[in-house]
Amino acid sequence: MSEDLAAGSSGYTQIRVKKFSYRWTISNFSFCMEGVLGKNFKSPTFSPGANDKQKWCMIVYLNGIDEESRGYLSVFVGLLSSPKSPVWAKIQFGIINAKKEESRIMNSQRVVRFNQNDSWGIPKFILRDFLFSTPYFFLPDDKLTLCCEVSVVQDCNSISEQNMQPGIDIPRCTLVDDLGELWENSSFTDCCLGVDGQEFRAHKAILAARSPVFRAMFEHDMEESRKSRIEIHDLELKSSRQ
């Protein structure tokens, strides 16, 4: 791993997406039962925002857009105008049913490229026979309400951030060395160990931390605690220094 990567340098690319939706209601829809192949209605134009110059519209083909989709309602969305071209977007269609819920949801699955006057849609959106046989669900008050959700790619912005999380050098633990130095130099000692005829200066805190026997001596009013001197018998000098 390189030093720069280990230090935490990184970057990211942000793809901004603007999502907007549109509802289109066609009243007296039962009068469209005798649909002609290729016959279509277009919705009023709509935009991502009030001051947005990008213009879209929905298109519904009453009896399919071609022979293959005959007998179906075909639903499309078209890009009428845009300051920038091409426009990349994901599309989702649905029907608002009698429960005011979105049903028959179908989408593009992928990002679609739109140039001006291009359209994209689903030729076999819903069977006409099925639609007209369930007017109580799909055509309340003889109205068909289609919805379209458009997610437009706005732009991409790549940012490089150096040292977002600077590397932290973890120092080597020197506790053992430091304690050893205290022992060797007899610094700040507060008790004495008598071993094999010799004396060694020591630290009560370290002895108590390392041995429950020493802890008991120092916690209670014992001779060793009062005199701060401990005689250790049956122990050789070499092993006591360890």
Image (cartoon, rainbow, N blue to C red):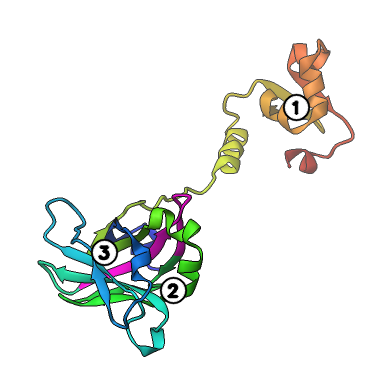
Distance from the alpha carbon under mark 1 to that under mark 2: 101 Å
Distance from the alpha carbon under mark 2 to that under mark 3: 30 Å
Q: Main secondary structure of the magenta part?
A: strand
Q: Verify CB contact (< 8 Å) between mark 1 and mark 3.
A: no
Q: Which residue is mark 3?
A: 152
Q: Is residue 180 left or right of residue 12?
A: right
Q: Verify CB contact (< 8 Å) between mark 2 and mark 3.
A: no
Point out which mark residue 47 bears: none
In primary-sequence order, the first of circles 1 and 3 is 3
Residue 182: quarter of image: top right
Q: Identify the residue at horizontal 45%, vertical 60% (top origin).
A: 138
Residue 228 in the image: above or below residue 59:
above
Where is residue 119 drawn, in percent x and y? 25, 76
Q: Identify the residue at horizontal 40%, vertical 53% (top origin).
A: 141
Circle 3: residue type? Val
Where is residue 2 drawn, in percent x and y? 38, 68
In primary-sequence order, the first of circles 2 and 3 is 2
In the depicted view, which residue is nearer to us: 238 or 128? 128
Residue 46: quarter of image: bottom left
User: Within 10 angstroms of label 2, few (less than 14), some, or many (20 or more) residues?
Assistant: many
SS assignment at label 1 = strand
In the depicted view, which residue is nearer to us: 86 or 217? 86
Q: Which residue is mark 1?
A: 193
Q: Which residue is mark 2?
A: 128
